[in-house]
Amino acid sequence: ANHKEVAHNILASLGLLGVADRRIGDRTKLDGGDEGNSRVHIKWDDLRFWPGSRRRRPFSNSKCNSGVRTGSAVSKVTDGVMTRKGGGLSGGERRRLSVAMELITEPKIFLADEPTTGLDSAQAEKVVALIAKLAKDRQVPSICTLHQPKTSIWNLLDTFILLAPGGKMCYAGDRSGATEYFKNIGYECPPETNPAEYFIDLVSIDTEDPVKAAADTERIDFLHHQFLDSCTATILSYDDVEMWTPPESGSASRMNKYISTNVSFSSKIRKEMTRISNTINRFASLLQRSLRQNIRNTSVNVLRFGCSAMQAVLFAAIFKSVRDDKPLTKSIADRVALLTYAVVNMSIMSLMKTLDLFARERFVVTREQMRHNYYGFEYLLAKVVSEMPLDTAYVLVHGAILKQLTGLRTSLATLMKTLSLMTVSSVSLGFAIGSLTSSVDTAMSTGVPIMVIFMILGVINPSGVNLDDPPMPIMELLKIASPIKWAIESLVVAEFRDMAFGEKERGLWGNLKDLPRMGALAMVRNGNEVLENLGLGNAKYSQLMKNLGILSCVYLSMSWLGLAFGGPKFIDIAASS
């Protein structure tokens, strides 16, 4: 069977194929969503078999082609709108759906805490039967906690553990031998009685009647000590068995050591190749999912393209002095402002989109990381790579219109390269903020002030810079962390380096006339002097771009740390015990 048939069979066994386009009443049951968001559209065809999962493995080739998405069977169930309003899926349907989501991938071990709670007897039997089939067909150890299973469910179990209050173990072993064991110690299951219910009654305490409670406690202590005695006898019976091992000659020992060494080396190579292959497969799956998510947001993408084009036209209309012929001295401030507006506009658009998207995906990413489907760095790298084509397209539209309608001296390639790297840095900053916050509202509330600060500190003052009055250390540190600063400085250096102004010698009167409006820049004679007055005389475009790239890597590292250490915390039961 292919992957669609596998998914179809699992969901059909759970009675979920008919549940299509439904509304789920409480979205927190599935993804721990934010109660402040009343509606969120979920495209569940992103549910996949994760190839090379860190603690899971995909279906074998005979069952499914690893790394492909589930088909219409899954989409039919899960493509819907989750909202707090409306009736939606019942509690039982939600429980069966959560079991199905776990069974779609092939786990190395399956743990289920009360999988039948909230289900009627028929559906409870279907769920347990599917889990039992999983354990037998795929050789996956399955452990479930069940309360009062009916007879048909009891017959599906291979082994069971009977726990009394206080964690006292009264039985652990084969289900088929349980009835005989309790009969031998004086507790025979009555005829036509469900053994599961009988055994549960044996370890129950009537807390309302002190006399019965004392008798129940005494019975539980007896059952507990009887079981411990039986375990001790079983262990002692193995102590008298002497294990025979054949003697080894010297040559045989050396040969075995040689074979063991070569087998171990080959095994290490295979493991390393498998690890690399799994990493590539996981990254490819994440990248494919991210690209499909971008393609789905058609209306948002069209709107962003339109905004980028309209803003470029607006900027060109505002700064008319940036003409297509030879540059003039009076256009210096407008050129700096035009480049600044372009950088700030693209940076804010990239950051806001990333904050909204990543913060909404955080719950799904956390859940998938809890299942060890992939590493946080693989997810971040896939998101950055998937965002690059769209962001580059926005930059191309914005930059091409600016270049066409204005007289910017810098080339279109330089303009695109700078704005593209700046958007990558802004996206990385958005990932960092989103990974360190817990909700969309928190991410927005944090991201907007940070971007405003970076914008204020990153903007160049066209009237010049006073090098004798250095900023405070904290201000300098914030400037270094601003992607807007590095992008603006890069474009300004590319625009004014070796620029020659087109007007004739203006004389002293011309310079004094422009002094109130242009400040120190009214006295400059070429582009290099402009850079000197702006504090960028020794700045190089390549070094500024390198700093912007390093800043992007720093923000990506912060995002990885946020995903790695900012998730849910768990108690180490082994250590606490």
Image (spheres, rainbow, N blue to C red):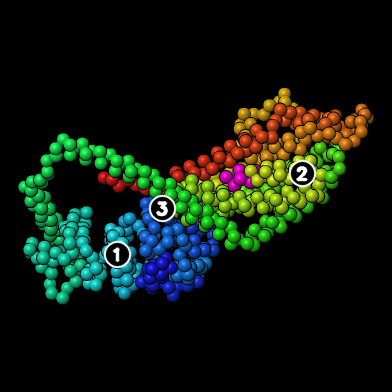
Q: Residue at x 79, y 29 (%)?
A: 529
Q: Residues within 10 Å of mark 2 (few under 14, many from 20)?
A: many
N-term mark: 3 or 1: 3
Q: Which mark is residue 52?
A: 3
Residue 441 in the image: x percent, y percent? 56, 52
User: Could you tell me how far apart the alpha carbons at marks 2 and 1 are, in whole angstroms?
Assistant: 66 Å
Residue 426 is one of the magenta-drawn residues: yes
Spatial separation of the CA atoms under disc 3 and disc 2: 48 Å
As drawn, is 289 to the left or to the right of 351? left
Q: Residue furthest top?
A: 468
Is label 1 in a helix, a strand or a loop? helix
Spot occupied by residue 230 in the image (x, y as percentages of width and height): 10, 55
Could you tell me what secondary structure mostly forms the magenta stretch?
helix
> Which one is earlier in the sequence, the residue at label 3 or at label 2?
3
The tag earlier along the polypeptide, 2 or 1, is 1
- Residue under label 2, please give it: 338
Q: Secondary structure at mark 3?
A: loop
Instruction: Name the residue located 42 percent from the left edge and 65 percent from the top edge.
Output: 3
Q: In the image, is residue 502 above or below residue 78?
A: above
Q: Residue furthest left?
A: 240
Question: Any mark on residue 137, and which?
Answer: 1
Q: In the figure, is residue 372 to the left or right of 360?
A: left
- The three-letter code of the residue at mark 1 reads Asp
Secondary structure of residue under mark 2: helix
Q: Nearer the viewer, residue 206 or 453?
A: 453
| Residue sitting at x 48%, y 58% | 33
